[in-house]
Image: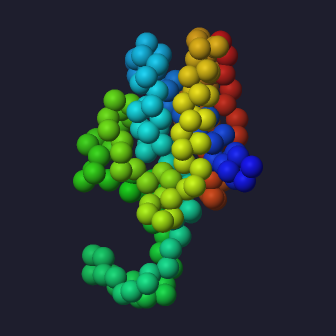
Amino acid sequence: MSLLIAGHETTAAMISLGAVTLMENPDQLAAIRANPEAITPAVEELLRFQSIADSANLRVATADIEIDDVVIKAGEGVLIPGSLANRDAGVFTDPDVFDPSRDAGGHIAFGYGRHQCLGQNLARLELQIALTALWQRIPTLRMTVPAEELAPRPPGAIQGIDALPVTW
């Protein structure tokens, strides 16, 4: 029960951002619709491309660390934005491009190491089911405003949008 309740806001935000991303990339959406198995890697790419929980990666340095001539002392707080790590060109080719056929393994949308989200497998399944069902039931779904006009949530724990005007 805790996994369902704790993961509701994050999964809901990811479903709406995933839908926007797919509607903005109609060729990729058509390929996913033509091959239902393609939803699995597409969800991994959506998780990499639309990182929603940057503030979840707050950590405390356990030792002095030097990065680019800056020393972070043991005991100091560190914020590791997943959205930046998930767009690292050293890890992902063309990281600012949504490519549902890429191997998006290695993204940190659910954290890393012992700090990984316990509900990540449930979230993946919910995203796969929701996004598949959305276009099976409403195949002509489209936004009524350009994505640039969607109002993002104010900075905070969960990134997303609160309204997604659509028609079909």
Q: Please give the name of the residue rendered at 67% of the width and 31% of the height, measured from the top-left corner.
A: 164
Q: Position of residue 68 (x, y in %)?
A: 27, 76
Q: Is residue 138 above or below residue 145?
A: above
Give the camera-side residue of 166 and 9: 9
Rendered image quadrant of residue 149: top right
Q: Position of residue 6 (x, y in %)?
A: 70, 53
Q: Is residue 45 left or right of residue 124?
A: left
| Extreme-front residue of the structure | 1
Q: Position of residue 35 (x, y in %)?
A: 42, 16
Q: Is residue 40 above or below residue 168?
A: below
Q: Is residue 66 above or below residue 33?
A: below
Rendered image quadrant of residue 70: bottom left
Q: Please give the name of the residue rendered at 54% of the width and 44% of the height, measured from the top-left corner.
A: 121
Count of numbered circles on the image? 0
Rendered image quadrant of residue 40: top left
Work out whether residue 131 can be spotted: yes
Q: Position of residue 34 (x, y in %)?
A: 43, 13
Work out whether residue 147 can be spotted: no
Q: Please give the name of the residue rendered at 49% of the width and 87% of the height, measured from the top-left corner.
A: 75
